[in-house]
Amino acid sequence: MMFVPLLLPLAFSAIVSALPCLRRNSAPPSWLPAVRWSNRSASDPPRIQRGFISVPIDYENREEGTVELGIVRLPATAAQRRGTLFYNPGGPGGVPSDYILAATETSPNFGQAVLEDYDVVGIDPRGVGLSQRVKCDPDLYNERVSSFPTTDEGFQRLVAHNAALGQSCLDLTGPVLNHLDTTNLARDMELVRRALIDDEKLNFLGRSYGSQVGLTYAELFPHNVNRMALDGILDHTQDETTTLNDEATAYEVTLNRFFAWCNTTLNCTLHGQDAAGVYQSITRKAQEQPIPAPGCVLAEYSACRPDVTGEEIRANVQGLLLFQNATAEFPGWDFLSEAISQAANGNATLLSSPLATSETFAAYAGLAIGCQDWRHESTSLADLRYKINMASATAPQTLGSTQSYYYQSNCIGWPAAATNPQSRLGPGIAKAPPMLLVNSLFDPSTSIVWATAIQRQVPNSILLTRAGSGHTSYQLRGEAAAAIDAFLVDGILPQPATVVHS
Ligand SMILES: *[C@@H]1O[C@H](CO)[C@@H](O)[C@H](O)[C@H]1NC(C)=O
Ligand SMILES: *[C@@H]1O[C@H](CO)[C@@H](O)[C@H](O)[C@H]1NC(C)=O
Ligand SMILES: *[C@@H]1O[C@H](CO)[C@@H](O)[C@H](O)[C@H]1NC(C)=O
Ligand SMILES: *[C@@H]1O[C@H](CO)[C@@H](O)[C@H](O)[C@H]1NC(C)=O
Ligand SMILES: *[C@@H]1O[C@H](CO)[C@@H](O)[C@H](O)[C@H]1NC(C)=O
């Protein structure tokens, strides 16, 4: 669930008109910052370049000062480079620089021809990675407060927890905490584009939440887009209940695929058992009495809770369901089956939630960005129970536990305003060139329903569907990846409604 994306707000038109100096072909603002290249780290792979840029905290009020962003660039290897490809792997809270620092000729995260032709650039978003980090109080983050309250008192406890945690983040991070939404990231990308390549247009590859980043940029700066490929489509245009229902359904349906997979392969630790029944029994048991997670004291696990509730199992299983086959970054379904099996035997270590251990814990940024991007308008227990009951009707095993629900519940009371709430894509998007959208049919995070909804709002976009399971497709290096590479490298788009199987 850490990798899902999310969405849009009040006044794109106001933002655009307030920023005429950022439009292509207008005179550069006198304050256009430069990228300051810095020395490499001893451990950096060859050719990696690192830099920093200072961008306005508040584009409407530059008196607020600047925030420093970290950038890495991997130059093209071909003698004739095609251009620069900006990359975002998802989140919110994911770290672009991590992926680019790990890129090699054989790395599944980038096609070989893409690395040959393009300078690949990662801008770590405000609050994330090499950029100025979101800081919060780890003890407040670690408080165990239910996001699924059943009493008014429980609802008030949740809101008070959210408010106190958010206030600690504001106090420790400073005013940039109020300016983390995705429109700010899109405008930061535009400044970096101008600082790095000025008269060249932007090429972009975004996975998961990265699709929202790309669409936001394309809506604001359509004339500056060249080739944009988006994989795992986040729909930041729907209301709260539709968003929740779509993601809850996607999680539930993919979980059932996982149970069916268990019956087909010995790779599933639960092979030969009723996997769905085992899952239900551990969540039910853990809801009554948390299941111990004794491994959480061992050094080989970074800190995690010493026991696990049913609510935590439902939240963490969504994350473990993202990738059917393990990737370099994430475990696969075999690991999920082992985690459920061990929990059934009384050891839930592998399903335990991470605990924050410092003021710069990586998960804070995803929450802080999400709270500014996603509506969270429930004001009472009844409002929240309505959403839970609705989602539980369509998702009876997972009960609406999703990344969308996390923002809808855990942002109530957050001190920073939702400055970029969901809204339909604005008219700017129609001026962007044709783009490629990719989604799998059984994606437990970014639902295929989101991809089709976005495809209808983005004229000339082509949606390619992978008839398979798992979140995003590029890293599988199958037919979907080949289509993305063909578009980025040669500008060739697939036929509309193309379906591939890998
Ligand atoms: C880079 O390293 C050189 C040599 O050690 C040093 O003189 C210089 O100040 C460093 N530059 C930056 C930006 O850190
Ligand atoms: C898998 O097999 C088990 C044991 O034979 C059975 O109880 C269960 O219904 C099957 N599950 C699926 C999803 O086919
Ligand atoms: C089972 O695991 C092996 C080893 O990781 C892998 O090569 C194989 O593709 C997996 N099979 C399935 C059906 O996932
Ligand atoms: C619990 O599970 C974890 C992860 O598999 C393992 O490292 C640990 O040794 C187990 N602890 C006990 C007491 O079984
Ligand atoms: C995972 O690997 C198995 C076995 O190699 C393969 O059949 C399956 O299609 C793969 N899943 C995905 C989503 O690529």
Image (tube, grey):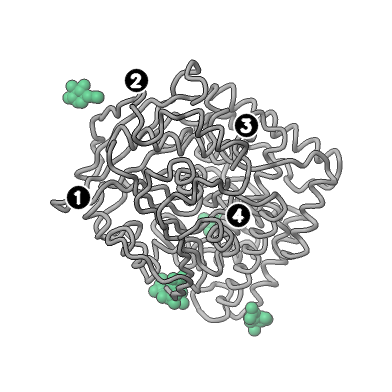
The count of marks equals: 4
First-in-chain label (3 vs 4): 3
* Residue at left offset 49%, top offset 54%: 208
Secondary structure at numbered mark 2 = loop
Q: Tell me the amino acid under the disc marked 2.
A: Ser
In which quarter of the view is residue 245 placed? bottom right
First-in-chain label (2 vs 3): 2
User: Which mark, by number, is residue 139?
Assistant: 3
Check mark 2 vs ligand 1: CB closer than 8 Å? yes or no.
Answer: no
Q: Where residue 376 sits: x, y (%)?
A: 70, 41
Q: Where residue 178 sits: x, y (%)?
A: 58, 28
* Residue at left offset 42%, top offset 54%: 329
Give the foreground label among 4 and 2.
Answer: 2
Q: Are marks 1 and 3 in contact (CB under 8 Å)?
A: no
First-in-chain label (4 vs 2): 2
Secondary structure at numbered mark 1 = loop
Q: CA distance from mark 4 to mark 1?
A: 42 Å
Q: CA distance from mark 3 to mark 4?
A: 20 Å
Q: Tell me the amino acid under the disc marked 3.
A: Asp
Q: CA distance from mark 4 to mark 2?
A: 48 Å
Give the foreground label among 2 and 1.
Answer: 2
User: Which mark, by number, is residue 81?
Assistant: 1
Q: CA distance from mark 1 to mark 3?
A: 49 Å
Secondary structure at numbered mark 4 = helix
Label 2, on which residue? 30
Label 4, on which residue? 316
Secondary structure at numbered mark 3 = helix
Q: Using the image, determine if residue 466 lies above or below residue 182.
A: below
Q: Is residue 175 left or right of residue 143?
A: left
Foreground: 454 or 382?
Answer: 454
Foreground: 142 or 108?
Answer: 108
Give the foreground label among 1 and 3.
Answer: 1
